[in-house]
């Protein structure tokens, strides 16, 4: 920082300020006074001396205290104190810190300034003053009457709610008014002369909530622009203020010229605001959006947004495409109402909303290419001191490809935690076996509309006609014991009962075209129940294997094998005696044979058909390695490294079946490397039986089908057939992955429920546009996912082999490159790929986004101000993907 910085010269005839250091100090130079005693000096206090708390002459209500780390000189004759080196003076609620302070108690004057660092030659120790709850003021120098609260500051710098004032002069007239001259008003936090842009106020008076200005002009990078006003009014509100939102201009290849995001902001209260915006196009299309933000600290907060769009992407005269979307997020502070919480995450609308309204998501590729929309609203209640819990929710799932909607309106869950009914609270010693019996209960109620076409959702009585209601009660009774020291025994009896308000009936209706009958499903209203029960028991143990090493860094490798043998039984509830299943039979007409179908009268297929009585086998392995401690490890404890977190094989043998009793053998494995930054997993299935591939002829075509034979492949000397396998490697790495540091502890109270209005506004901007937040503190990030899958149905095989990469890298401290791509290795094709270049211009952002090919081929260049209050101040140039009319996959 330059000490004798020359102030800017305006084009309006005002004289520049030559020196920002007040030249009214007639005392000898600091260098000459240090270490000497004049006739007027009675004492010299070295660093660390007690603070001077003597009252000044006159009628002061507070004590003036002073302190300096270097040295202190007191002139008792003139009642002047000189403070050197990290000096500090306080008077009441006024605080002043500087490298040099002169305290004149007789005249109640304070003079402060910084000093030149002899090594860096920079101006350091600038005065920092603070009055009460006001924010600190930084200046080159100041002169202040602490009795009348008046003073002068040269080259001041202050901040309030994201706005900054710096440069020129400031004169404090009283406790509420300050006069300014040649100051720059900006959202750039760099003090003058490094401020990038702003409005130069040649003369003005600042009050608590406003700045009244005389002539003012715009300045960018120190260059005055011919954009001036004779007088002005700059609000400094401490509450939310309503106002007009300035739109942006541009052109869309299909919709024509547009006026985008014009509207009005309504500051309803300190807890709530409403933003209304619209976009119009020259060819008749338009978009509307209203967003409500609400926040009550330590209680709750959320955002509700309603959007509607009417677009004509077809020929002139064609009817427009109308879309709507509703989003709602709500969070509650867990301490606001202990035991009771309400949360919401809603995203619902027409399936083509994001494709037809790309600007609604700031052309975010993830939003444009998503296949599903999901919503949940959930309320939960826990009664302290009881085992009971209640949860009520609404959910929505929307398939954008098939344009179908699934709704759960509502779902209810009431649970009772496990109890030990035969145990006593006053029991002494180990419990008896019967005291280990546990009982729990759960109730699940659901109203579901499954896969309804989007166009029929709000037609007629669709909701009442297609809604399926079910109530599920579950009562599990369990017992767990240890026996023979090394074995664990567990047993359970489960009773499940479903209640329904509708059942279905299926029948074959005579076909009129092909000559065959078609299957018709009818819904029958009325209460029905279905109850099932099952029994299971199992025994498990652990087997340890250890290999010790005498040389090297590896001390031992341990393998833990956990075998589990279980038995389970449940009846065949499809038997006619239960009445849960019925059979539909078609009419037999030559040359077509009859058809039959056995089905459950309940829409969800409950209960399952077939009797089960068999033995299950599960084998799990974990492998760990023990390493010697590092030379820098003072604890001396060995390090444990997991080589394999799990390798599992499982199957089931059903004695109740007459054939094909052994079920497919499933296997899985997973582990993590690089401190679990990279995860590896594999899943697969083996069929132990032989399969025949046969041919048939239908409508003159040869059709191939398979038939499973009750013969093991091992009987023919072959290994069980691999029918499916999938393998994946995923991870997220950055510059700290290989050099871990202590995690950063969040500041106390820094939560969603405690953020202020400005933080909430900034967070809303980031959520709507993730590229608005770029972290230069992390030099590089890499997220990847490789997946391979293979399926074999004996007639043909299929496989997929894909890789996904995304991340960013710092080219310099101000340049960052972002990337995201998907590659199909088997098809040798790239999927959606995007690149981004980000340039930090301190108080400005330059962002370039590019999709080089495909349906969403486009680019976007944006130059905008960082400050949240000026988010609409930006310059954009884009090529919309909607102009890719001739794209083919």
Image (cartoon, rainbow, N blue to C red):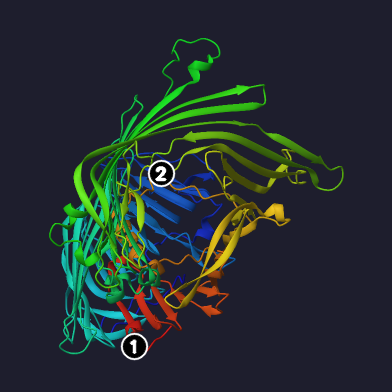
Q: Is residue 556 visible?
A: yes
Residue ID at (73%, 43%): 633
The outermost residue toward the right is: 551
The outermost residue toward the left is: 460
The reply, left or right, for residue 774 in relation to residue 523 is: right
Give the percent coordinates (x, y) of residue 255: 23, 85
Give the percent coordinates (x, y) of residue 806: 51, 69
Element marked by disc 1: loop
Q: Is residue 229 above or below residue 810?
A: below
The 10 Å Cα crowd at callout 2, few under 14, some 14 to 19, many 20 or more, is some
Of the numbered discs 2 and 1, the one sitting upstream in the chain is: 2
Foreground: disc 2 or disc 1: 2
Q: Mark 1 points at which residue?
A: 885
Residue ID at (29%, 88%): 253
Residue ID at (52%, 34%): 568
Q: In this view, does 855 lie above or below 344?
A: below
Q: Mark 2 points at which residue?
A: 608
Taking depth in this image into account, of 815 and 835 the one nearest to the observer is 835
- State the image quarter where residue 482 is shown: top right
Q: Is residue 159 visible?
A: no
């Amino acid at each position: 920082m330059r000490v004798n910085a020359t102030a800017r010269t305006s084009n309006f005839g005002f004289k520049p300020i030559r020196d920002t250091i007040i030249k009214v100090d007639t005392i000898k130079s600091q260098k000459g006074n240090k270490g000497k005693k004049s006739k007027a000096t009675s004492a010299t206090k070295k660093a660390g001396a007690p603070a001077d708390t003597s009252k000044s002459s006159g009628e002061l209500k507070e004590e003036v205290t002073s302190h300096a780390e270097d040295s202190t000189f007191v002139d008792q004759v003139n009642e002047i104190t000189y403070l050197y080196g990290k000096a500090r003076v306080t008077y009441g609620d006024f605080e002043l810190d500087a490298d040099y302070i002169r305290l004149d108690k007789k005249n109640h004057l304070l003079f402060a300034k910084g000093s030149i660092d002899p090594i860096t030659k920079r101006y350091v120790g600038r005065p920092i003053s603070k009055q009460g709850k006001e924010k600190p003021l930084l200046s080159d120098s100041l002169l202040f009457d602490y009795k009348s609260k008046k003073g002068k500051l040269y080259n001041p710098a202050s901040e309030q709610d994201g706005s900054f004032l710096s440069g020129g002069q400031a004169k404090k007239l009283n406790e509420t008014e300050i006069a300014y001259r040649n100051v720059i008003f900006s959202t750039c936090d760099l003090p003058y002369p490094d401020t990038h842009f702003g409005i130069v106020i040649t003369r003005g008076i600042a009050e608590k909530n406003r700045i009244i200005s005389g002539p003012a002009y715009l300045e960018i990078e120190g260059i005055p622009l011919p954009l001036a006003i004779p007088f002005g009014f700059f609000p400094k509100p401490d509450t939310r203020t309503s106002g007009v939102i300035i739109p942006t201009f541009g052109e869309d290849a299909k919709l024509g010229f547009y006026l985008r995001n014009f509207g009005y902001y309504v500051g309803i209260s300190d807890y709530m605001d409403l933003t209304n915006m619209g976009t119009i196009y020259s060819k008749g299309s338009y978009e509307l959006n209203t967003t409500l933000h609400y926040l009550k600290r330590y209680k709750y907060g959320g955002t509700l947004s309603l959007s509607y769009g009417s677009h004509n992407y077809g020929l002139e005269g064609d009817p427009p495409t109308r879309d709507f979307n509703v989003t709602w997020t709500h969070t509650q502070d867990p301490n606001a109402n202990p035991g009771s919480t309400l949360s919401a995450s809603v995203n619902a609308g027409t399936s083509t909303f994001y494709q037809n309204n790309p600007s609604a998501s700031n052309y975010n590729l993830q939003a444009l290419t998503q296949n599903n929309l999901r919503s949940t609203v959930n309320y939960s209640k826990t009664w302290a001191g009881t085992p009971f819990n209640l949860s009520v929710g609404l959910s929505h799932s929307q398939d954008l490809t098939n344009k179908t909607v699934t709704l759960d309106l509502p779902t209810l869950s009431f649970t009772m935690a496990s109890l030990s009914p035969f145990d006593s609270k006053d029991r002494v010693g180990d419990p008896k076996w019967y005291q280990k019996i546990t009982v729990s209960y759960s109730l699940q109620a659901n109203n579901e509309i499954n896969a309804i076409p989007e166009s029929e959702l709000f037609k007629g009585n669709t909701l009442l006609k297609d809604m399926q209601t079910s109530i599920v009660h579950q009562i599990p009774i369990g017992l767990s014991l240890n026996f023979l020291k090394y074995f664990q025994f567990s047993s359970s009896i489960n009773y499940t009962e479903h209640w329904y308000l509708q059942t279905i009936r299926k029948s074959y209706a005579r076909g009129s075209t092909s000559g065959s009958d078609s299957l018709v499903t009818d819904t029958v209203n009325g209460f029905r129940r279905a109850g099932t029960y099952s029994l299971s028991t199992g025994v498990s143990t652990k087997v340890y294997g250890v290999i010790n090493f005498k040389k090297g860094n590896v001390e031992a490798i341990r393998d833990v094998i956990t075998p589990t043998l279980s038995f389970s039984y449940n009846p065949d509830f499809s038997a006619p005696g239960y009445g849960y299943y019925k059979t539909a039979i078609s009419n037999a007409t030559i040359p077509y044979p009859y058809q039959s179908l056995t089905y459950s009268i309940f829409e969800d297929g409950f209960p399952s058909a077939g009797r089960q009585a068999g033995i299950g086998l599960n084998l799990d392995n974990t492998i760990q390695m023990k390493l010697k401690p590092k030379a820098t490890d003072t604890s001396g404890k060995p390090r444990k490294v997991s080589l394999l977190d799990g390798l599992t094989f499982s199957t089931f043998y059903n004695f109740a079946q007459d054939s094909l009793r052994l079920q497919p053998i499933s296997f899985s494995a997973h582990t993590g490397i690089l401190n679990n930054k990279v995860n590896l997993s594999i899943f697969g299935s083996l069929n132990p039986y032989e399969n025949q591939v046969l041919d048939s002829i239908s409508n003159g075509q040869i059709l191939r089908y398979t038939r499973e034979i009750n013969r093991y492949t091992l009987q023919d000397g072959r290994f069980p057939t691999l029918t499916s396998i999938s393998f994946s490697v995923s991870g997220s790495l950055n510059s700290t992955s290989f050099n871990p540091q202590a995690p950063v502890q969040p500041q106390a109270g820094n939560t969603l429920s405690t953020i202020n209005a400005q933080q909430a506004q900034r967070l809303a901007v980031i959520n709507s546009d993730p590229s608005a937040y770029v972290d230069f503190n992390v030099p590089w990030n890499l997220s990847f996912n490789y997946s391979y899958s293979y399926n074999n149905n004996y007639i043909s095989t299929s496989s997929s082999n894909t890789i996904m990469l995304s991340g960013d890298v710092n080219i310099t401290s101000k340049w960052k490159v972002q990337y995201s791509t998907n590659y199909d290795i088997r098809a040798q094709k790239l999927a959606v790929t995007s690149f981004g270049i980000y340039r930090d211009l301190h108080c400005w952002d330059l962002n370039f986004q590019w999709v080089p090919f495909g349906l969403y081929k486009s680019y976007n260049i944006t130059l905008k101000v960082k400050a949240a209050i000026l988010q609409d101040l930006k310059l954009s140039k884009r090529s919309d993907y909607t102009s890719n009319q001739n794209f083919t996959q």
